[in-house]
Amino acid sequence: MIQILASVFSLLLGAAILVVGNALLGIVLPVRMGLEHVPEFQSGLVMSAYYLGFVLGSARIQSLIRRAGHIRAFAALAAIMTAAAMVHALIFDIWVWAGMRIVAGFCLAGLYAIIESWLNVKSSNENRGQILSIYVVTIYTASFGGQFLVNIGTVQGTELYCIVGLAVALSLVPVVLTRVPGPEIDKIKPMSLLALYRASPLGAVVTCGAGLLSGAFYALGAIYANAIGLSVFEVSLFMGAPIFGGLALQYPIGWLSDRYDRRTVLLGVLAGTLISSVTVILIAMKQGPFAGTLTAVFVFGGCLAAIYPIAVSQIYDYIDRSEMVGASGGLLLIWSIGAVAGPLIASALMGPFGPAAFFFYLTAVALLLLIFTRYRMVRRVARPAGEQTGFVAMQTTSAIAGALDPRTDPLPEFHYEDIDPGDR
C-alpha cells in the first residue's frame, strides 16, 4: 500500500509541476503579444494553435507509445516541449509562436495521457474515483499557481520562459523514476461523433459549446485584461480567479446535478455563465471596481468548469457502461474542436469591435447553449434523478482520464512481469 501511495504521489507531483509550467506559458504569451500590440486575430490564431496541437496529439499518441514505450515517449515529449518554450524566448514571430503552440499542444496531450494511464494502473475499482478527484484538484491548484508566477519576471525577458522549461524538465524526475507499467491505451477506441450526438444531442452540443467558451476564455482572457489596461499582477488575478472558481464551485454544482434533473441544473449553470459574463460587460462600461470584475469571473469560471462534466454525465445517462471510456475520447475531440474555433471567432470579433467584443462573444455562446438546453428539455423526457449516472469532476486532459472515471468499466489489468524491460 505504501509503495502504491508513493507511486501515485510521484505521478501527481510530476503532473503538478508540468501544469505549473504550461499555465505560466499560457499567460506569458498573450500578455507579451498584448504589450507588443499584436492584432487580436493574430493573437487568437497563436493561442488557438495549442488546441489544434492537442487534437493532433490525442490522435497520434497511441502509435507513439507503441513505438517508443511509455517512459521514453514521456521523456521525448517533455524534451520537445522544453525546447518549444525556449524558442518563444529566442524568437518573437507570430508564425513561429503559432507553430510552437501546436508543438506544445501535441506534447501536452501525450504527457497527460501517459500520466493518466499510469494513474489508472495504480488505481483499483474501489479507489479510482478518489484518485481522479485528487488528480482534478491537483490540476486546478497547479494551474492557479502557475498564473501568478508571471509576476516574478518580465514577459519581454527570458526568465519566465526559462522557468517554463525548468518546470517541464523537472516534471520528468518524479514520473520516470516511478516503476509503473503503462496500460495498452490503444485499446481505447473513441466513440464516433455521430453516435454521441444520437445518444444525446444536448450532451454533444453542450460539449462543443464548453470548448467554444473555455478555449476562448483561457486563450484570450489575458489579452482582454491587458487591453483594458490591467497591470500584469491584475491580469494574473483576472485569470486566476476563474480557475479558483472552477475548483470551488464544480463539486457543489455536481452535488445538485445528482439530486435534480441534470438538464435543469445545466440550465442554471448556463444562466450563471450568462449573468456573470454580462456583469463583466456592465462593470467595464461603468468603469466599476476591479473587485467586482474578479467576483464576476470567479462565478464565470465556476460555472464554466461544470459545463463539460455535466455534458459528459448527460451522455453517460444514455449509453452502456462498456461504451463510456470510448465516449470520453469522442467527447474530448468535440470539446477540442470547439476550443480551436472559440479563440479564432472571438479574436476575429475583437479586431473590428474592440476588447469589449470578447465578453459579448462569451455571452452570445452561453445564451445559445441555454436556449438549446431549454429546447431539448421539451423534446425528451428527463431521466429520473435516481437513474442518472453520478456527476464526476473532470478535466479536459486526455481520453485516458475516462478510464479513471468510476462510472466506466476499468481497463484490463496488466502485470509488471509482462512488460518489456525497456519500458519499465
Image: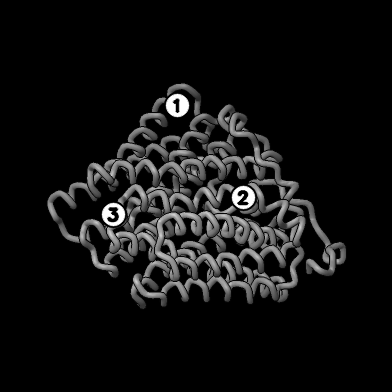
1 vs 2, front mark? 2
Q: Cα distance, mark 3 to mark 1? A: 33 Å
Are the residues tagged 3 and 2 within 8 Å (C-beta)? Answer: no
Dot 3 crowding, Cα within 10 Å, few <14, some 14–19, many 20+: many
Left or right, 188 with respect to 357, comes to right
Q: Quadrant of residue 328?
A: top right
Amino acid type of the residue tagged 2 in the rendering: Ser
Would you identify the image quadrant in which residue 342 lies? top left
Q: Nearer the viewer, residue 226 or 238?
A: 226
Query: Eyeballing the image, is 206 above or below 215?
Result: above
Residue 294 visible? The answer is: no
Q: Which of the marked residues, 1 or 2, is nearer the chain's N terminus?
A: 2
Q: In which quarter of the image is the C terminus?
A: bottom right
- Specify whether 354 is left or right of 110: left
Relative horizontal placement of residue 116, taking residue 365 as reference (left or right)? right
Of 56 and 336, nearer the camera is 56
Residue 220 in percent (x, y) is at 35, 53
407 w.r.t. 291: above or below: above
Q: Amino acid under label 3?
A: Tyr
**Which disc number belongs to residue 58?**
2
Q: Distance between the residues labelled 1 and 2?
A: 30 Å
Could you say where residue 132 lies in the image, as x and y percent from the top left? 59, 58
Residue 356 visible to an observer of this rendering: yes
- Name the element at disc 1: helix
Depth check, mark 3 against mark 1: the one in front is: 3
Q: Mark 1 points at which residue?
A: 376
User: In whole angstroms, how far apart are the C-alphas of marks 3 and 2?
Assistant: 29 Å
Residue at numbered disc 3: 224
Image spot of residue 41 (x, y percent): 34, 47
What's the residue type where badge 1 is placed? Arg
